[in-house]
Amino acid sequence: CQQEGETFFGIPLSRKSDSKLLTTTSFQDQFDFEYLLDRNFTYMKKFGTNHGWLVGEELGNGAGSIVDKDTAHIPIFYTGTTNPAMGGISLEDLIKIGKKIDFGTLYIKPAFVFQDDDGSIKLQFEADANSALGYLYSNLCKMIGISWNYESPFNDLGKYTNCAMHAAGDRAKYGCGPDNANSGGFCPQMTLAYRVGFQSEEHAAAYLDRCNNYVDYWRSLYPSGVAVGTSAFCPDGG
């Protein structure tokens, strides 16, 4: 792989998208992530980057210089650059690969909000290795994961990449979560903000407690998970 890239298979969760693929501005109406934000800096002190909230930053919020669009999403499988000349795989071929996998309806269920070791605020979703999402991940590894530890990918299109961030031998059952091995790359998360600094440890705990109270509400609303969508985009969900 001779070039970096941020291409990935994932689930779009934006509610204020400018995508030309939509006849509406929203990819989903099941989750309103505004309830997880701290726009008034009640708990937060500062952002460590100039991106602010990744679900859409507001002008004059003071978070940074960039007024970002809503880019809410759950990345599932990172494929790297779409430049085949640099070791990647084209977007056209990625679409063909995706169409080869009959993965069914993708149900997602929020688990909890947490701050990782880099200071990012993330919403974790349940990583069910036996779900359609787990099936999709495992098959993407089989088809276009990188060769590693005597495991090589295979697909009948003969299209591969040297830039994927997942091994051909990885499977959903090796991913994160109490029922998995916690050694692989299957770990559905959505990043809310990068490098967040709180006013104190007590403020951080209070913020996370507030967020997770609302996540608990979502979990009660969708006890078996939900296939996201809208009446104008993926109306049957998933």
Image: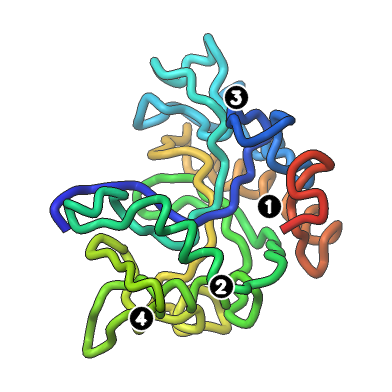
Query: How far across and how far down the image is residue 16, in percent?
Result: 65, 29
- Is tag 2's residue or tag 3's residue first in the polypeptide sequence? 3
For the residues bearing labels 3 and 1, Cβ distance under 8 angstroms = no
Which residue in the structure is indicated by mark 4? Answer: 154
The quadrant holding residue 142 is bottom left
- The residue at the point 36 percent across, 71 percent down is 144
Label 4: which secondary element: loop
Three-letter amino acid code of the residue under disc 3: Arg
- The residue at the point 55 percent across, 65 percent down is 99
For the residues bearing labels 4 and 1, Cβ distance under 8 angstroms = no
Q: Residues within 10 Å of mark 1 (few under 14, many from 20)?
A: some
The CA span between labels 4 and 2 is 13 Å
Which residue in the structure is indicated by mark 3? Answer: 39
Task: Give the quarter of the figure containing the C terminus.
Answer: bottom right
- The residue at the point 61 percent across, 41 percent down is 207
Label 3: which secondary element: loop
- Is tag 4's residue or tag 2's residue first in the polypeptide sequence? 2
- Furthest toward the top, the residue is 60
For the residues bearing labels 2 and 1, Cβ distance under 8 angstroms = no
**Nearer mark to the viewer, of 2 and 3:** 2
Q: Residues within 10 Å of mark 3 (few under 14, many from 20)?
A: some
Which residue in the structure is indicated by mark 1? Answer: 212
- Is tag 4's residue or tag 1's residue first in the polypeptide sequence? 4
Instruction: Say if 230 sits above or below 54 in the image.
Output: below
Tell me, yes or no, if residue 38 can be seen here. no
Instruction: Say if 220 sits above or below 20 in the image.
Output: below
The CA span between labels 4 and 1 is 41 Å
**Nearer mark to the viewer, of 4 and 3:** 4
Instruction: Say if 60 sits above or below 111 in the image.
Output: above
- The residue at the point 41 percent across, 29 percent down is 47
